[in-house]
């Protein structure tokens, strides 16, 4: 027997919260979709004379404000003249004050990419010679914190609301027109509309703080909200609210005038409602496509319609799945979802999956650009997870499809499914009337006799209560009548509970319908996690952009290294270590290139005493210039391959004798720190 719906619903809610929490915590601040690909002066360079401006080049166009690009002297004072200007294409520059003294300067930037995501960062360059600076190069990235978490949850809620709204309405119109009178289905579609509306309003309020200060207090800043309304993202959110007003009218007609028509009139109205609903659904989907990934990069004219089609297919599949789940669990016994409706949805779902595969393949090619991006970028890794979840969902759906075929095979008159539905309707109508024949006879007779006796007892109690009030009996007699009335109410509650339990037993009596309910519930669980992964994917930097930015940064670093005379060449330090325990001995080697002030490339190698490379759980590096009280500056290199870790853009603020300390952890409890001094710069 199937358990009650409440525990299963709680399980889905917990699964949803766990998936969202894991993805939000793992994602951290919003990933930048516009990457810094070049700068002048370049990162870490030492120039002979003070430049007149600082220019930054991004991988796509960005939106800037007065404080988007700032240049700070060694004491943290601004030396730029104000708002940056768009020099050409994706290059932005800010003018500097004249006569800047020698020293190390820090460049910070905070912009909004063309696909609506905030981007921030910082780097240093020096005039004349490097100096000590009080400005931290790294800090909390924009788009993180409490506001970033709320914004991410709002994005998830908006996608979920769209899926329930569009998918629920499509399921009713295309597969189950009689479902318009089922209260549980009505509540599901209306809940989707409410969720999408609430999420859109929240995103509007959060947007200014999300792309700016990140402070909770700025959420209700009306001036900031006015600035948001002038942006592309603000305009698309407002247009989404207007389309939601049209969607509210559509829902009112669907569950109002349409529901009151008979089957023949419904068929005449279905086409018009379907066209109107498709227009509204496409418009809502376009509010995402016009402001996010599809609106920038390669082939935006093709990518935006493909994105709309992709999102619409997702909603039709997953939203229809949620509606089917509600119908199987919550539809009254006298309004069960028909096997024909399940078959029609199976066909619709298959078409949606085919559409998803085609549009998803195009989107993957467009966002990744190479096979290596699948494993080398966060976007590619998330995409692999999504592909795996889709494959799992299709596998579970194939099981549901088999149950649907079996259910259809028992749907003929006199079959188990038809009899169960007929008995459920008869019992719900009272059960104590003239019993039917066959299977219905035993059920109707058994319940009818008991109910008749209970009804007679209730009537007698009510009669006694009325007689006591009408004939002026003593207070004791009135009390007796009250007891009779209470007894009648208790019997009525008992009958209602018994009817509910009977309907549930009859609904679960068909093993094919029972199996379908379980498989659809499993599909819904996978769909919840899939939606969370998809939401995280839309806020992650595309693999193509990430790889292009890495290549541009490497080229820029190489160019700046070869163009300055202060480079001292690569530095290699070998340090034996002994952390104790198994595999506790070895040699750690640190390569630093070009070993000068500014940006450096660091490679760390761990080998056994015999020279063979091997892996350890963790390697950390810290740099300290004790003569100037600078550091320790932590470096967390990334694992590349067996025994090899690497970190790029390691900033060394000034030349001097630096202490390089390496911590090697060989097990959960064994670690050791070794160090050497080296002249850098």
Image (cartoon, rainbow, N blue to C red):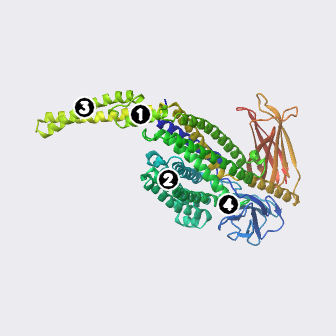
Could you say which quadrant of the image residue 118 lies in? bottom right
Using the numbered discs, state the Cα–Cα distance from disc 2 to disc 3 in whole angstroms: 46 Å
Task: Tell me residue 564's x, y (percent).
Answer: 87, 60
Label pair 4/1, CB-CB below 8 angstroms = no
Category of crowding for the residue at label 3, using alpha-carbon neighbours closer than 10 angstroms: few (below 14), some (14–19), many (at least 20): few
Using the numbered discs, state the Cα–Cα distance from disc 4 to disc 2 in whole angstroms: 38 Å
Chain-order first, disc 2 or disc 3? 2
Chain-order first, disc 4 or disc 3? 4
Using the numbered discs, state the Cα–Cα distance from disc 4 to disc 1 in whole angstroms: 56 Å
- The numbered disc on residue 267 is 2
In this rendered view, identify the residue nearer to me: 665 or 171.
171
Secondary structure, mark 3, is helix
Residue depth check, mark 4 versus mark 3: number of the one nearer the observer? 3
- Residue under label 1, please give it: 423
Using the numbered discs, state the Cα–Cα distance from disc 2 to disc 1 in whole angstroms: 29 Å
Residue depth check, mark 2 versus mark 1: number of the one nearer the observer? 2
Task: Tell me residue 342's x, y (percent).
Answer: 54, 41
Using the numbered discs, state the Cα–Cα distance from disc 4 to disc 3 in whole angstroms: 72 Å
Secondary structure, mark 2, is helix
Secondary structure, mark 4, is helix
Category of crowding for the residue at label 2, using alpha-carbon neighbours closer than 10 angstroms: few (below 14), some (14–19), many (at least 20): some
Horizontally, residue 456 falls left or right of residue 666, namely left
Residue depth check, mark 4 versus mark 1: number of the one nearer the observer? 1
Task: Tell me residue 576's x, y (percent).
Answer: 83, 36
Horizontally, residue 649 falls left or right of residue 494, namely right
Using the numbered discs, state the Cα–Cα distance from disc 3 to disc 1 in whole angstroms: 24 Å
- The numbered disc on residue 295 is 4
């Amino acid at each position: 027997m199937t358990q009650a719906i409440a525990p299963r619903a709680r399980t889905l809610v917990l699964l949803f919260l766990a998936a969202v929490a894991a993805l939000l915590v793992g994602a951290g601040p919003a990933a930048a979709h516009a990457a810094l690909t070049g700068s002048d002066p370049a990162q870490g360079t030492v120039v002979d004379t003070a430049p007149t401006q600082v220019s930054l080049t991004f991988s796509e166009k960005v939106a800037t404000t007065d404080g988007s690009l700032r240049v700070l002297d060694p004491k943290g004072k601004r030396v730029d003249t104000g708002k940056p200007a768009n020099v050409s294409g994706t290059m932005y520059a800010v003018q500097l004050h004249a006569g800047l003294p020698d020293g190390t300067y820090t460049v910070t930037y905070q912009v909004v990419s063309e696909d609506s995501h905030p981007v921030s960062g910082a780097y240093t360059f020096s005039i004349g010679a490097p100096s000590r600076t009080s400005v931290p190069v790294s800090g909390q990235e924009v788009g993180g914190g409490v506001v970033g978490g709320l914004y991410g949850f709002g994005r998830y809620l908006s996608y979920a609301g769209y899926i329930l709204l569009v998918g629920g309405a499509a399921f009713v119109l295309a597969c189950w027109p009689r479902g318009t009178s089922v209260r549980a289905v009505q509540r599901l579609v209306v809940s989707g509309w409410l969720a999408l509306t609430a999420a859109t309003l929240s995103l509007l309020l959060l947007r200014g703080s999300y792309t700016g200060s990140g402070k909770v207090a700025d959420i209700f800043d009306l001036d900031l909200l006015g600035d948001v309304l002038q942006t592309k993202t603000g305009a698309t959110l407002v247009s989404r609210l207007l389309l939601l007003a049209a969607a509210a009218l559509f829902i009112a007609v669907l569950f109002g005038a349409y529901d009151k028509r008979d089957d023949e009139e419904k068929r005449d109205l279905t086409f018009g409602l379907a066209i109107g609903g498709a227009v509204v659904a496409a418009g809502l989907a376009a509010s995402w496509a016009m402001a996010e990934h599809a609106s920038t990069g390669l082939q935006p004219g093709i990518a935006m319609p493909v994105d709309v089609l992709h999102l619409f297919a997702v909603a039709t599949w997953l939203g229809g799945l949620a509606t089917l789940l509600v119908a199987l669990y919550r539809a009254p016994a006298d309004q069960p979802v028909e096997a024909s409706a399940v078959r029609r949805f199976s066909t619709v779902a298959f078409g949606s999956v085919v559409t998803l595969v085609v549009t998803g393949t195009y989107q993957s090619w467009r966002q990744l650009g190479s096979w290596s991006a699948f494993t080398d970028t966060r976007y590619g890794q998330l995409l692999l997870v999504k592909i795996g979840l889709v494959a799992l969902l299709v596998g579970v759906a194939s099981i549901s499809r088999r149950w649907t075929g079996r259910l259809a095979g028992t749907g003929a008159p006199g079959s188990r499914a038809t009899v169960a539905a007929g008995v459920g309707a008869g019992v719900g109508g009272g059960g104590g009337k003239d019993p039917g024949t066959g299977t219905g006879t035993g059920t109707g007779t058994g319940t009818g006799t008991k109910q008749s006796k209970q009804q007679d007892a209730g009537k007698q109690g009510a009669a006694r209560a009325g007689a006591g009030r009408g004939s002026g009996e003593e207070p004791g007699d009135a009390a007796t009548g009250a007891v009779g009335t209470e007894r009648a109410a208790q019997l009525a509650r008992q009958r209602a509970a018994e009817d509910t339990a009977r309907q549930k037993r009859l609904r679960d009596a068909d093993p094919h319908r029972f199996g379908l309910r379980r498989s659809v519930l499993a599909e819904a669980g996978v769909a919840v996690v899939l939606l969370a992964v998809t939401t995280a994917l839309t806020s992650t930097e595309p693999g193509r952009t990430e790889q292009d930015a890495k290549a541009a940064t490497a080229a820029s670093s190489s160019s700046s290294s070869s163009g300055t005379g202060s480079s001292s060449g690569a530095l290699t330090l070998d340090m034996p270590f002994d952390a104790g325990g198994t595999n506790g001995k070895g040699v750690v080697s640190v390569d630093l290139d070009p070993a000068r002030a500014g940006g450096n490339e660091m490679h760390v190698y761990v080998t056994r005493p015999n020279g063979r490379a091997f892996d350890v759980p963790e390697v950390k590096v810290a740099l300290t210039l004790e003569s100037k009280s600078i550091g320790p500056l932590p470096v967390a290199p990334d694992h590349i391959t067996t025994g090899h870790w690497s970190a790029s853009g390691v900033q060394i603020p000034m030349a001097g004798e630096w202490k390089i300390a390496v911590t090697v952890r060989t097990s959960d409890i064994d670690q050791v720190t070794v160090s050497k001094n080296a002249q850098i710069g």
